[in-house]
Image (cartoon, rainbow, N blue to C red):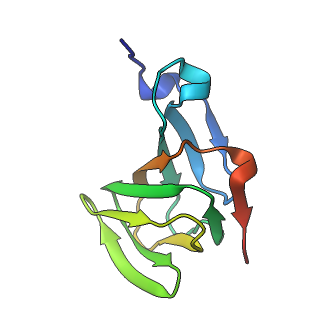
């Protein structure tokens, strides 16, 4: 059994400048899973830095709107959109709205800070 409130998750700024709260991570929450889930926030008018992970990442947009860039492709995103970023693929997201852009990041295998590379 696992239970956590979002407000109990420690907030930090990731290497790509996204504001994160790890909701569930096998290294920190003692759960037998091979992935991690984080709640992410990009403030209005801001963007994450171009980066890539060694893991596959799935985004689920909770609120707001933006422009997602994955490799050589770009597309508009909004609430309830879901998409996958392949491992080792350059990515970043721009908040194009007037409110915070909120989304879940599901990373498999689980996210590790040292495996996130900024690629400007």
Q: Nearer the viewer, residue 45 or 118?
A: 118
Q: Is residue 1 above or below residue 50?
A: above
55 and 17: which is toward the camera: 55
The residue located at (38%, 16%) in the rendering is 3
| Residue 15 appearing in the image | no
Give how far across and how far down residue 109 sits, in percent: 53, 45
Q: Is residue 68 left or right of residue 12?
A: left
Indicate the quadrant containing the N terminus: top left, top right, bottom left or bottom right: top left
Name above or below for residue 66 compared with residue 40. below
Image x and y of residue 69, in percent: 49, 78
Identify the residue shown where x is 49% and y is 41%: 38
- Residue found farthest to the top: 1
- Quarter-of-image position of residue 15: bottom right
Considering the image in quadrants, where does the C terminus appear?
bottom right
Q: Position of residue 111 (x, y in %)?
A: 59, 45
Quadrant location of residue 82? bottom left
Above or below 97: residue 32: above
Q: How many marks?
A: 0
Is residue 83 found left or right of 34 in the rendered image? Answer: left
Q: Residue at x 48, y 39 (%)?
A: 35
Query: Residue 62: where, in percent of width, then height?
Result: 32, 52
Residue occupying image coordinates x 61% and y 26%: 27
């Amino acid at each position: 059994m696992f239970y956590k409130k979002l407000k109990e998750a420690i907030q930090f700024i990731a290497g790509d400048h996204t504001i994160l709260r790890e909701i569930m991570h096998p290294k920190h929450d003692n759960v037998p899973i091979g992935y991690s889930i984080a709640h992410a926030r990009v403030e209005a008018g801001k963007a994450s830095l171009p980066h890539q992970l060694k893991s596959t990442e799935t985004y689920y947009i909770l609120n707001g709107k933006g422009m997602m860039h994955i490799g050589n492709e770009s597309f508009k995103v909004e609430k309830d959109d879901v998409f996958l970023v392949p491992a080792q693929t350059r990515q970043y997201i721009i908040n194009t709205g007037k409110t915070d852009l909120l989304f879940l990041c599901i990373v498999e295998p689980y996210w590790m800070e040292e495996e996130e590379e900024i690629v400007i």
